[in-house]
Amino acid sequence: MSATPDTEPTLLTEDLRKTYGTVEAVRGLNLTVRRGEIFGFVGPNGAGKSTSVGMLSTLLRPTAGWAMVAGYDVRYERHKVRGSIGIVFQETTLDTDLTAERNLRFHADLYCLPGREGRRRALAMLDLMGLAQRRSDRVRTFSGGMRRRLEIARGLLHGPKVLFLDEPTTGLDPQTRAVIWEHLHRLRTEEGTTVFLTTHHLEEAEHCDRIAIIDGGRVVAQGSPAELRSVIGADTILLRTGHDEAVVRALRERFALEGVVTPQGVRVEVKDAAAYIPRLCAGLDIPLHSVTAAPPSLDDVFLHYTGRTIREVGADLPMRKG
Ligand SMILES: Nc1ncnc2c1ncn2[C@@H]1O[C@H](COP(=O)(O)OP(=O)(O)OP(=O)(O)O)[C@@H](O)[C@H]1O
């Protein structure tokens, strides 16, 4: 199967909404995910990611709007949607007293995969996720990364067209995350599965073909990581100083630049940082501890669209109607 995402949409939403009482968790989602794509749904805690996945996987009923997953309507063809998707939740649901293979075979029985086919598929998915050697070991002896890979293998048993992964690498160290990503790319290449994953780590989003940035229940930007970075079309300068507000004022008055105060310092976007820094240093009569420049990151993209860094947002307050 092809590793290149084609243009056929596997997941489409139009103005999808979910309201809990007065809390508008998802406020009009418009998404297009192409077949074979690794799509990242990126946003801070409380942005509405899990609620969106809940609606797309038919576990939650939308309040309004429309969504199609794997060719089926999430509202009126729930069973068909369910048969075409796999889901890996944030919380682990493995039986740690059983072996890796037993966990998968138990799940295969639930999906009515007959004995021999269930075993063939379980072994193939264990192999795909790099766990074939450990298939006869109890899950309690597995590391966090291995458990996550086993859950992904289990989500793939019935050959879903779309695999939903809710925060697949949360709580894992960078090396283990890298291994998970290696396997997700392999999965796309070998099975052609569309992967829809949520994350609040912007650096994770760099691994995706395309991402949507969600904040306060709304998508604020959508595209490939490179496309989103190019929207900024500028470098970022970070000024560390003990006088953030004075620097922001001086940037505005003397350079017509809009600085933003972040926990890391004052950030400002300029076309050519290397050329601009000497002018800035000469023109600001405020003591600076350090000045650093960098090409735009997805953190900068988030800041550009929301006015805050993703770390600042933390656990967002619920969005209320009105
Ligand atoms: N059952 C519920 N009842 C009321 N409010 C809810 C419910 N579930 C979620 N919310 C609220 O809806 C908003 C979106 O929550 P959601 O869990 O979808 O966000 P998220 O981006 O997945 O965050 P996290 O990564 O922390 O799960 C939040 O304000 C949350 O408090």
Image (tube, grey):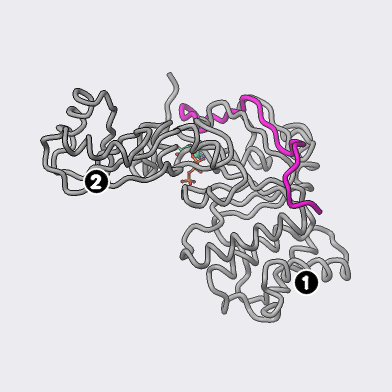
Q: Which residue is mark 2?
A: 291
Is the C terminus in the top left, top right, bottom left or bottom right quadrant?
A: top left
Q: Residue furthest top?
A: 322
Q: Position of residue 157 (x, y in %)?
A: 76, 60
Residue 123, numbered label? 1
Task: Tell which circle, 2 or 1, labels the residue nearer the N-terminal end.
Answer: 1
Q: Position of residue 131 (x, y in %)?
A: 67, 73
Q: Residue at x 64, y 34 (%)?
A: 61
- Label 1 near ligand 1 (CB < 8 Å): no
Q: Is residue 18 magenta?
A: yes
Q: Residue at x 71, y 54 (%)?
A: 188
- Residues in magenta? 1-25
Separation (CA) of disc 2 from disc 1: 53 Å
Q: Amino acid at mark 1?
A: Leu
Q: Residue at x 58, y 66 (%)?
A: 179
Q: Quadrant of residue 72?
A: top right
Residue 36, numbered label? none
- Vertical comparison of 170 with 28: above or below: below
The crowd level at tag 1 (other Cα within 10 Å; few <14, some 14-19, many 20+) is many
- Vertical comparison of 305 with 97: above or below: above
Q: Amino acid at mark 2?
A: Val
Looking at the picture, tell me which residue is in the foreground, 206 or 312. Answer: 206
Main SS of residues in magenta: strand
The crowd level at tag 2 (other Cα within 10 Å; few <14, some 14-19, many 20+) is some
